Amino acid sequence: MMTSKENDISQSFCPVLGEEMSLLVQEAQETYLSSHDTSDLHRLALMYKALGDETRLKIIALLLIRDLCLCELVDGLDVPTSTMNHHLQVLVKGGVIQGRREGKFTIYQCQRDILSYLPFSGQIQKIDK
């Protein structure tokens, strides 16, 4: 529970509290989020999480040029296999890349429907594979 001093401080720094904040949250929900169900928002959050790391953006840039396996990505980016596995799992979970089995290897490729979300999407030329 806040003391009266903490309450005074929070009110002086936070002009939108209580009922006014509830109305603001409701307006945001109705205006921007009403067309998305919870699973859509969760999927978007996972995608943006996947895009929120420099190493993962480097992985995506490589995969935009060519489909690659784990060992090629490890060699190209000079990161430990365990670290690369983690990054690939986050990218797969976020729907940014997908893997396909070829013999004993998993080959990774970018999901083309996420290209417009990439920070360097303006530099991406039409890619035909």
Image (cartoon, rainbow, N blue to C red):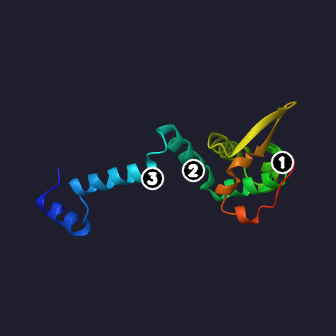
Q: Where is residue 89? Give x, y as percent.
A: 66, 41
Q: Nearer the viewer, mark 2 or mark 1?
A: 2
Q: Where is residue 65? Give x, y as percent.
A: 83, 55
Three-letter amino acid code at the position of disc 2: Lys
Residue drawn at the location 68% of the way across and 53% of the way down: 56
Secondary element type, mark 3: helix
Give the labeled residue for mark 1.
72
Work out whether residue 101 or residue 17 is closer to the camera in this orientation and state it.
17
58 up-or-down from 43: above or below:
below
Three-letter amino acid code at the position of disc 3: Tyr
Q: Is residue 18 visible?
A: no
Q: Where is residue 58? Give x, y as percent.
A: 72, 57
Secondary element type, mark 2: helix
Work out whether residue 10 or residue 24 is closer to the camera in this orientation and state it.
24
35 up-or-down from 102: above or below:
below
Q: Where is residue 60? Give x, y as percent.
A: 73, 53
Horizontal side of residue 68 vs 59, given as left or right: right
Q: CA distance from mark 2 to mark 3?
A: 20 Å
Dot 2: few (<14), some (14–19), or many (≥20) neighbours within 10 Å? some
Residue drawn at the location 27% of the way across and 56% of the way down: 21
Residue drawn at the location 24% of the way across and 66% of the way down: 15
Q: Is residue 39 visible?
A: yes
Dot 1: few (<14), some (14–19), or many (≥20) neighbours within 10 Å? few
- N-terminal of the two: label 2 or label 1? 2
Disc marking residue 49? 2
Disc marking residue 121? none
Q: Residue furthest top?
A: 103
126 up-or-down from 123: above or below:
above
Q: CA distance from mark 2 to mark 1?
A: 23 Å
